Structures are given as structure tokens and as C-alpha cells.
Amino acid sequence: MSDQQVDNSKRRFLVVAASGAGAVALAGVVTPFIASFFPSERAKAAGAPAEVDLSKLEPGQKIDVEWRGKPVWVVKRTPEMLANLAKNDGKLADPNSEANQQPDYCKNPTRSRKPDIWVAEGVCTHLGCSPTFRPELAPADLGADWLGGFYCPCHGSKFDLAGRVFSGVPAPTNLVVPPHKFFGDGDSMLLIGEDQ
């Protein structure tokens, strides 16, 4: 065999092997790029509505639910809690909930779809701390005129049991009420994140 002769079978094998290796490398580079166009399961779950079973929620009780990475509170208010809401109106910065922080169906004195069930994001509108639930009446640290609500320990903001902010505190606005709806037998289920 002279130097001029070429083994075509070896050449063909090398071309096929190199092409295969190139295709695998290209697929390895392109796959993550294409996958970035589709949201991850974690991202899908973060934006998904949250379901809450209300059947075991007791009067005066608050439960926490996570929706879109934020705490959301669901409170079952007692008749006494509801009666005390109007007594706070003169001390509140936005008693009629005129700022756009709740769906239209919650622009009412109770800031809720159903008076006894209240839903709100558990994030202070000042700097994003999570206020504590303080349903007791007239505790020593909050004063004799305290009728229950939420107290933010970070900077002292106070909210009533409808999430309305008191005047003269650092928080500028009421707590945010997310879109929500009731469904199921006797409206025993709550869906946070959808209201249609």
C-alpha cells in the first residue's frame, strides 16, 4: 500500500464517530438553553393557588398558609371581634379601605367576602416583617383601648382584626388582602389566589 492510498472504511468510521460526538456535545449545550424557556415545578407551585380546609377552623383561631412564598393568614372572627371593628374607625389611617390593597369584593367594613372569615397577607406594609396575632383585649403592652388585632414587633405598627392600619405608626397602608374564593359543601374550602 502506498502513501497515496487511503482506507475509506477507516475514514468513514472517523467521520461518523466525530459527527456523533459533535451531535452529543451540541445536545448538551442546547438542552439547558431550551429548558430555561419552561418554568420549573417549584416556580409553578409558587404561583399556584393555595387550598385551605375551613371545616376545622375554630372561632377566634388564625391559621397560616403559604402562597407565592408569603404567609397568608386566615382568621375566623367571633361575633365579638366583628362588633369591635367599628370601635376602631376613629383611630385608623384608612378605615374605609380606600387604598387599592384588596379586591373590590373586600372593600367593606370587614374587608372580607364573608364577615367571619378574613384572609390577608401576613406581611407588614412598612418593611415586610410578619406581625403577631394579638386577639386579646387591653393587654398591658398595647394599652387599655386595644380591641385585638396584629402587632408588628419590628417597628411597632398596629393593625385591627380587619388588617386596617392604625394612625401614627410606621406602616403606611392596610394589610394586603389577596384574591380568594370559597367553594365546596357549605363553602368549607377556601382557594387563595383565584377569585373567578
Image (cartoon, grey):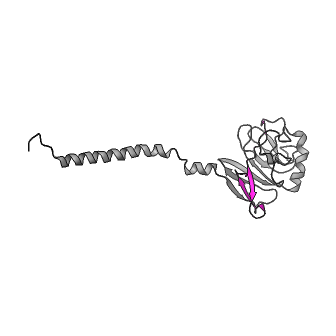
Residue drawn at 74 percent across, 37 percent down: 126
Total labels: the figure holds 0
Q: Verify whether residue 179 appears in magenta.
A: yes
Residue drawn at 71 percent across, 37 percent down: 127
Quadrant of the drawing holding the N terminus: top left
Q: Position of residue 109 (x, y in %)?
A: 86, 47
| Figure quadrant of residue 19 | top left
Q: Position of residue 76 (x, y in %)?
A: 80, 56
Query: Visible in this render: residue 144?
Result: no
The prevailing secondary structure element of the residues shown in magenta is loop
Q: Nearer the viewer, residue 176 or 136?
A: 176
Q: Position of residue 74 (x, y in %)?
A: 75, 53
- In the displayed structure image, the side of residue 147 where residue 133 appears, left or right: left
- In the rendered image, the residue lying farthest to the bottom is 185
- In the displayed structure image, the side of residue 183 where residue 38 appears, left or right: left
Magenta span of residues: 168-196
Query: Visible in this render: residue 29?
Result: yes
Q: Position of residue 61 (x, y in %)?
A: 78, 56
Q: Nearer the viewer, residue 3 or 47?
A: 3
Q: Verify whether residue 176 appears in magenta.
A: yes
